[in-house]
Image (cartoon, coloured by chain):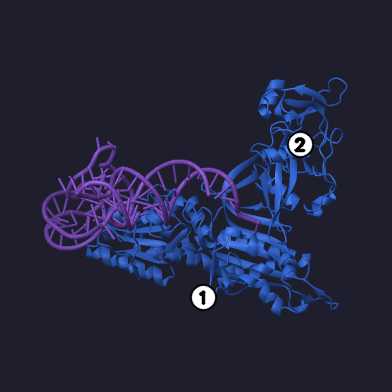
RNA sequence: CGGGGCGUAGCGCAGCCUGGUAGCGCACCUGCCUUGGGCGCAGGGGGUCGUAGGUUCAAAUCCUAUCGCCCCGACCA
């Protein structure tokens, strides 16, 4: 029997001053967690019970599709060099040396370890497919840990990896995960969304994020008000609203006009009495990518968008197969555009051919040192007679038509979606919300199997690399998201499936023998019926116990009080505050009817 | 890494500007009292004022350095 009087449940009347988001304040106040350092938390009794229950659900559902391993946290440098991520991960990876001076790191994720097992052991197509998973602590040296458990440097993650013979097999493994994740998050009682996600500059073809909407979240999610379209900001698109082009002036050729001091889109548009939608916005970058020698390679890129749109740098990175972007310095603008910032434009540039996007080799010069990638946002395709910078201080062009007056390397979707734009599927309005990412599934492709030399023989005796997927779930984030979605000023309530206890029995007056013994009997009776019960038998005033019961996330409370003389107790549902009188002999049956559906 | 803020008892804070006995609320301990929403009364314990150096007769307070934590931004396959 779990007696509150004998347990360590350090509840606080006030939240720590440095807690900002609801889940952080409440998890600390309720005695679930305590902070040890920036982004490092201890889980106390209640917190541990909740996370253990979450892991139990994850394990049950994952066991239906895969096999659980337990892999090392400590990884040798050589392993990560094989995949190239020893350098790619940069400062986000915790690194250390052993006594002999050998480099090690703490695992951020386990593609390398899993692949190293696969390459040693998997020999034949007959052994595939495989799905291997683990529930393990991961380490990431976040530049800025924040928001309690939402962004931390050490956290528990369920991560799994699939190995298949071909893309069709990967589809099956991917779908198995998709379904398992839905079951897991359903069972955890979360109101989640599945969104299309950016699949990364490192390759990979398809990806979904599982997210929970909350103001505390850091992900931006675009979703349709009407249909089921949903995607994260890095991936989302919208229908381009039609714009009526300006009429050509003069002979219709680009016309140089004096626009003194009007370097910003808004100023130019106002000066010329047109909408920013008639302007071409230019953003010039140096795209970066680590070279084979570990040094950063750079090449120039300019993006052209409609004046009222903004660049989605993640889309641009993906398009360019680059790892980083930085905006051009003044002298670089001068070099490539012969013009100052605010007045750069597409006319007269030296455009790299489309093939150069695939052959990412900035060291290879194609004659003209001014040549660069010119990326046109698709919203500009088909437009005519636009306004743009003339690559000359205080001058713009009118009458500029893409394709006629300037060429470009490629036209693609590189803009960010704005709230209220039209859904690409159904045309209804799009909304943007913040959300917490709780799970991510990802088609990896051949990146790791190829770079690390995993090979199996196919049916024809030919050696092929297995195709991989990787799939993650943040255990603590499930708890955090659950708290974020169900709390008030008095505390929070968890679904019974992940709450540390399903019921808290409050003996309102422990000085009263009848009340105390009845509370104990009810607790024992429910426990034998398989209900997880916490008995609050502390010698405290009722108010103290009610406040604590409201605080600590337990979904049901039984008040054992004066009504025992009537053979009656109150059952209070934390989420609604609804109280029901139940006869004591019927209490067990009452919860047996209530809980299974709520679990 | 850039900008801002904060380190004083377990938690929340005051004191610092203007140097001189370290304080308040909650929590904790003892006793009494009370028992349906953090009850009341009385008594009590607990702090090298983040750390190191400096200035001074004297430093929580002024100066310097350093460490830690929080927030905004950058960053976040």
Element class at badge 2: helix
Residue A333 point in image, percent of width and height: 72, 38
Count of labels in the image: 2
Q: Earlier in the sequence, mark 1 or mark 2?
A: 1
- Residue A409 falls left or right of residue A527: right
Q: Give the letter of the chain under mark 2.
A: A
- Nearer to me, A76 or A492: A76
For chain A, what colour was chosen? blue
Q: Position of residue A593 (x, y in %)?
A: 47, 62
Indicate the chain on which mark 1 is placed: A
Which quadrant: the N terminus of chain A?
Answer: bottom left
In the picture of the structure, the residue carrying the numbered disc 1 is A99
Relative to A62, B64 lies left or right: left
Q: What residue sits 65% from the left and 38% below the top?
A: A418
Could you tell me residue A72's position as x and y percent?
A: 56, 73
Give the residue number, with chain letter if any, for mark 2.
A337
Q: Are marks 1 and 2 on the same chain?
A: yes
Q: Is residue A176 shown to the viewer in this render?
A: no
Residue A382 percent location from the top left of the image = 83, 35
Packing grade of label 2 (10 A; few <14, some 14-19, many >=20) is many
State if disc 2 and disc 1 touch (CB < 8 Å). Answer: no
Q: Under tag 1, what secondary structure?
A: loop
In the rendered structure, the colour chosen for chain B is: purple
Residue A526 is left or right of residue A178, and the answer is left
* In-front residue for pair A306/A580: A306
**One can see residue A91 in this view:** yes
């Amino acid at each position: 029997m779990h007696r509150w009087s004998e347990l360590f449940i350090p509840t606080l009347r006030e939240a720590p001053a440095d807690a900002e988001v609801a889940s952080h304040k409440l998890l600390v106040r309720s005695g679930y967690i305590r902070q040890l350092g920036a982004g490092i938390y201890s889980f106390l009794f209640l917190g541990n019970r909740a996370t253990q229950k979450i892991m139990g659900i994850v394990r049950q559902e994952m066991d239906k599709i895969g096999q659980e391993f337990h892999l090392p946290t400590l990884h040798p440098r050589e392993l990560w060099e094989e995949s190239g991520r020893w350098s790619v991960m940069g400062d986000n990876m915790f690194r250390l040396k052993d006594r002999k001076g050998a480099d090690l790191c703490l695992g951020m994720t386990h593609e390398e370890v899993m692949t190293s097992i696969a390459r040693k052991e998997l020999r034949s197509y007959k052994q595939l497919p495989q799905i291997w998973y683990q529930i393990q602590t991961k380490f990431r040296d976040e530049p800025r840990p924040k928001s309690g458990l939402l962004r931390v440097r050490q956290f528990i993650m369920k991560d799994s990896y699939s190995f298949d013979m071909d893309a069709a097999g990967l589809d099956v493994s991917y779908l198995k995960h998709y379904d398992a994740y839905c079951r897991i998050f359903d069972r955890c009682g979360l109101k989640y969304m599945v969104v299309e996600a950016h699949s990364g500059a490192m390759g990979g073809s398809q990806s979904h994020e599982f997210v929970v909407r909350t103001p505390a979240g850091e992900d931006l999610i675009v979703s349709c008000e009407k249909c089921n379209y949903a995607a994260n900001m890095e991936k989302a698109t919208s229908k381009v609203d039609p714009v009526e082009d300006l009429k050509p002036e003069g002979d219709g050729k680009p016309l140089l006009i004096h626009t003194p001091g009007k370097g910003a889109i808004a100023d130019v548009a106002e000066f010329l009495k047109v909408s920013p939608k008639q302007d071409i916005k230019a953003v010039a970058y140096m795209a970066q990518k680590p070279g084979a020698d570990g040094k950063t390679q750079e090449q120039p890129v300019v993006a052209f968008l409609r004046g009222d749109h903004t660049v989605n740098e993640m889309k641009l990175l993906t398009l360019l197969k680059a790892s980083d972007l930085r905006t051009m310095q003044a002298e670089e603008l001068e070099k490539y555009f012969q013009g100052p910032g605010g007045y750069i434009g597409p006319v007269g540039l030296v455009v790299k051919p489309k093939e150069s996007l695939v052959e990412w080799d900035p060291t290879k010069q194609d004659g003209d040192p001014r040549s660069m990638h010119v990326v046109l946002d698709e919203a500009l395709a088909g437009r005519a007679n636009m306004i743009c910078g003339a690559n000359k201080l205080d001058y713009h062009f009118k009458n500029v038509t893409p394709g006629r007056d300037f060429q470009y390397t490629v036209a693609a979707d590189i803009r960010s979606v704005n709230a209220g734009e039209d859904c690409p599927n159904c045309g209804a309005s799009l909304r943007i919300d913040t959300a917490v990412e709780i799970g991510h599934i990802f088609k990896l492709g051949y990146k790791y199997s190829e770079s690390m030399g995993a090979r199996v023989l196919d049916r024809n005796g030919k050696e092929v690399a297995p195709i991989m997927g990787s799939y993650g779930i943040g255990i603590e984030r499930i708890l955090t998201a659950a708290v974020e979605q169900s709390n008030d000023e008095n505390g929070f309530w968890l679904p019974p499936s992940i709450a540390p206890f399903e019921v808290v029995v409050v003996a309102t007056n422990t000085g009263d023998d009848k009340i105390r013994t009845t509370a104990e009997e009810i607790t024992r009776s429910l426990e034998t019926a398989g209900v997880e019960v916490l008995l609050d038998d502390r010698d405290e005033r009722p108010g103290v116990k009610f406040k604590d019961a409201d605080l600590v996330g337990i979904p049901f409370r039984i008040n054992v009080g004066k009504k025992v003389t009537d053979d009656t107790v109150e059952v209070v549902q934390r989420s609604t505050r609804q109280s029901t009188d139940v006869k004591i002999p019927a209490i067990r049956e009452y919860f047996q009817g209530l809980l299974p559906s709520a679990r």
